[in-house]
Image (spheres, rainbow, N blue to C red):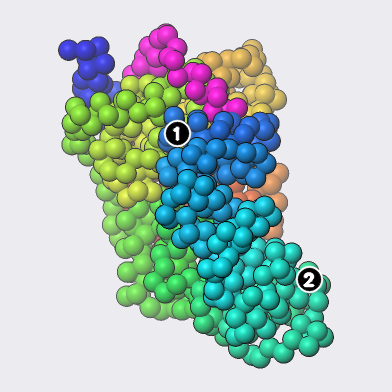
Amino acid sequence: MSSMHRKLSALSLLLLVCVSAPAQCQDGSEWDRARAQLRASAPSGMSQAIDRWKQLSTSGSYGGGFDDYASFLLTYPGFPDETKLRAAAERALDFGSAQPARIVAFFDRFPPQSNPARAQYALALAALGRPEAATMARDAWRGGQMSADAETMIQARFGANFKAEDYDARVDALLWAGATEQASRAVAYTSTADRPLAMARLALLQGQDPAALGLAIGPEALRDAGYVYNRSQQLRRSGQLYAAVNLLSTRPSATAPARDPRKFVAELLTVAKSAGAEPAVRIAGSIDDAFPAGTDVSHESFAVRDDYTSLMWLGGTKALWSLGNGSEAAPLFYRYGAAARTPQTRSKGFYWAGRALARGGNAAEAQRYFEMAAAYPDQFYGQLALERLGMPLPRFDASLTLDPTPAQRAAFMAKPLTQAVREVARESDWPTAVRFFREIADQAQTPSDHALVAELARNLGRRDLAVILGQAAGASGVDGFQQTAFPLIPVPGDTDWTMAHALTRQESQFAMNAVSHAGARGLMQLMPGTAREQAGKLGLSFDAQALMSDASYNLRLGGAYFSRMMDIYGGSYPLAIAAYNAGPGNVNKWLRENGDPREGGIDWIDWIERIPLSETRNYVQRVSENAIVYQALNPAKAIYRGANPLSHFLGKRSPG
């Protein structure tokens, strides 16, 4: 048996023991033993590839050519930031030369992401005499922007075959991109049907009034998403915000989807943020014509999903909190959840859809949405939904039965990314390690894939990889990884065990070498000044290095600081958690502005959602859900074992 197979067999046994018999791994020290073994091992040959990746992926610090990026991507597929590196390779084509064969080989493996790259691909295909060059050239022409040289060459070589509808599509794309110079050159070749609207949009982009130029367009222009987009932007930029609000809140449905839904949704969101409650709700409710019928927005890019969900949340909260209209709020909250990929956002949207309908007296329909939210029981809103349904938390300690085959393990271990993860886990700065950990977790598709990453996390002794794997599994709809995703760590005896785990999982994901952009350090992300003060209160000497090298020291100081916050707020967990993140000064301010939920002036859930700092709002929810899961997984350590555990933890008077 090879040494690698012996390690994998031992690893599988360890995973089985710790999942099926958690009492045998009760303090989590097995993670630290594995970590120590890894750090004692020799570096691998992958370190040079990681250094090269850092150089190429650091924005603005490396002006490499196309061949630099292409060579790396073809040699190390699947490394983090692949999309970013591909974009850098594509941009480099506009500032240097590359052999057509090299360009074609790259784009055959990595299809163009941008239209300028699509144009370069078409020209390289033509240089090699490939028959698909004409089709690629037409696609690039219709796609809009490209370099001036590429525009000249494509028009000279393929222009005779382009039709009016190709120019219609090209000008539409250029106008969405704001490329007025290229659009001006092409607009004369558009069809007679499309030209008036195209010229009107061009005038808007140039800061002119189409009517003043004699461009007569009828009310049907308001059914063109491109015209509405350009008109709204022109109104905003000229100081006519009220007119932009009126335009977007009263417009008829578009006859065709937006060519660039990302920009269209972003414009709707920008205007809705400045609108009153009623027009904001109407703008949010009108969004679906941005996409083809039946589009699942959760499959769109992050940029689209982010603005879409922000608009749905804005519309839903305006409808419910400002207008008191639960029936109008519910579908917006539902779309907020349905458009998301992460369990925390999906459960939040479905819960609030149910809550909006419950407020409106539609209990039966509300229950359906609560059931949808309850499908995510390790999430804040999933736990609240279970309480609304009168259901207990499920068993999170069920044993994993997944057993990847030897062939699957061998293929997984042979991947360059897996080898790189092992190297960054051995010795690397925290930001680099996290990027590789997220990449390998996000690439897992099947339950077996996730099991292999879970095994790798334990083998490397990296609790942070385990947490990240659990998050990725939840986003992929793969269940059964809570034992791995909520790892244990030895906690000093005078420290709140549950809160040490709940806070650390959110603060650093158990990475001892974590350092925030603000300078917070270690497991519980303590600022050196705060740590020094807390050490003095405990009668301990302060050691800045120990914040990142001594887990017990960091946990003891962080736990004691949290206890201080608990004392300040009379034992209120959510207020103490918020203060741990944002400081008691901010929490006191929010209590004055939004009311004190301890006194019944405002519901706890409403108060948390009104925290103006999104980081703190998210933090309170994540730490709270962590505490509930850790108690469920480790009942002997539980602070409370009764019904409705999250509401009890929050101090909420009614369940859910």
Name the residue located 52 percent from the left edge and 82 percent from the top edge. Answer: 255
- Mark 2 residue crowding within 10 angstroms, few (<14) / some (14–19) / many (20+): few
Name the spot of residue 427 as percent of width and height, x first: 49, 17
Between 653 and 235, the one nearer to me in the picture: 235
Q: Amino acid at mark 1?
A: Leu
Residue 418 is left or right of residue 328, and the answer is: left
Report x, y in % for residue 318.
Answer: 59, 72
Which residue is label 1 attached to? 74
Other residues around mark 1 within 10 Å, as few (<14) / some (14–19) / many (≥20): few
Identity, as a three-letter code, of the amino acid under mark 2: Gln
Which residue does the image show at 52% across and 47% down from the upper left?
127
Q: Which residue is denoted by mark 2 in the rendering? A: 206
Residue 38 appears in the figure: yes
- The secondary element bearing badge 2 is classed as loop
Residue drawn at x 50%, y 27% is 433
**Residue 378 location (% of width, % of height):** 37, 47
Task: Judge left or right: residue 286 versus residue 491.
Answer: right
Label 1 element class: helix
In the picture, which quadrant includes the C terminus?
bottom left
Query: Where does the N terminus fall, quadrant-wise?
Result: top left
In-front residue for pair 430/551? 430
Q: Is residue 591 magenta?
A: no
Q: Is residue 278 visible?
A: no
Residue 417's place in the image compared with 649, above or below, is above
* Alpha carbons under labels 1 and 2: distance apart: 42 Å
Magenta-drawn segment: 26-55
